Amino acid sequence: MLALPLECLQVCDAVAQNKNMSVRILGIESSCDETAAAVVADGREILSSVVASQIDVHRKYGGVVPELASREHLRQIVPVVREALEQAKMQLADIDAIGVTHGPGLVGALLVGITYGKTLASALQKPLVPVNHLEGHVHAVFLEAHKSGSEPKLPAVCLIVSGGHTVLYEVTNAVSAQPEMAVPQGGLAPFLYRKIGQTRDDAAGEAYDKVAKLLGLGYPGGPILDRLAAAKNGVPAPVKFGSIKTRGNPYDFSFSGLKTAVLYHVREHPEYAPEIHRREESLARGERKYEQLLPLCSSQTLALVREFQNAVVRDLVDRTLAAAEELSAESILVSGGVAANSQLRATFEDRAKSKGLEVFFPSRALSTDNAAMIAAAAYSRFKSGIFADTSLNADPSLKLA
């Protein structure tokens, strides 16, 4: 998978030999339900970032429908890439390499981005750089931190938390861990990853979506539950969810039981049914904004949502901080769609500070799936000469570590 045409290798050599030459990578992301393209210079400067969301397509089903996602990617991929180039004020010929997500994700969705990336790379005689979607989320943190001039110190503990993933990694500098490794000229030191915990069932974002659907609050569930949980009403929670227990690895997550506890509570209290029905009617009319749904939520429902979110945030923060303490981490990284949650951010910042740790998040735009993070992750791989040929295929279960 490392064979490249001679002309392509000559381009790579020319870029590598000139330390002052900016490396501009076109990133393509299509692992789930966002079609995204971006141009990033030198792994850190975002020249453009375009994301076409499919939320409206999948909303009526309460989740992502793989076949529909693939069709939407086919429809969007060309205009999205074109817009990313226009925003960057560049032509395809100006791109030095193409970075594309090849896993993990939905196989049909991945294949759309991979096929288009391979076609561009072949036609333009440009290097094709395969990128793990999860590594992209790690680089999203560094993209954001670079703007402030204060990058996270390593080793770090990284929590990637989204609708499809809830996983903890130890992130170290590959050169520090392996002193004999040479850093490519002008390149960033590559990272090494070690998985230290993962969800055993539902991802945190998946639990948000299922609870929101149960309560008649629509899809996606994370944003609306986050805002409703912040609606202070002074009413005690109608049920208390204790700490989530897992046997074995203390850094593994489990949210299926919490989701089921919400389900049983609602079933056991029929007074929830009328307002759930009213909210479902509101959604059917297209009235799904926070301002439209809030008046349809009783104080009891708001307190239930608040208690659910408290339990999720508490578990994510507790396990991440415990891992950071055991591993003597220098910093904490939090990325993925659920990293946009306001309570999660505030709780992490408060509790990490009390332990003398600095916590880093991407902006909300870079927390969710995007192609800027893919182009950023592709940079160090490009500098290290990690390329793919036309045999590159989708790997829906691709591991980071």
Image (spheres, rainbow, N blue to C red):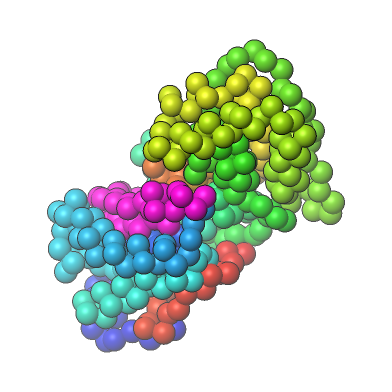
Name which quarter of the figure residue 228 lies in.
top right
Highlighted range, magenta: 33-62
Q: Is residue 282 above or below residue 35?
A: above
Q: Name which residue lies at 48% across and 28% down.
A: 293
Q: Nearer the viewer, residue 105 or 108?
A: 108
The answer to if 144 sits in the magenta stretch is no
Name which quarter of the figure residue 238 lies in.
top right
Residue 204 is situated, as x and y percent measured from the top left of the image, at: 62, 46
Q: Residue furthest right?
A: 247
Is residue 398 visible in the rendered structure shown here?
yes
Q: Name which residue lies at 41% across and 49% down.
A: 55
Q: Name which residue lies at 61% across and 29% down.
A: 274
Q: Is residue 26 above or below residue 253?
A: below
Residue 222 is situated, as x and y percent measured from the top left of the image, at: 53, 39
Residue 68 is situated, as x and y percent measured from the top left of the image, at: 41, 63
Residue 215 is situated, as x and y percent measured from the top left of the image, at: 60, 36
Q: Is residue 398 above or below residue 227?
A: below
The answer to if 44 sits in the magenta stretch is yes
- Identify the image quadrant of the N terminus: bottom left
Q: Nearer the viewer, residue 188 or 353?
A: 353
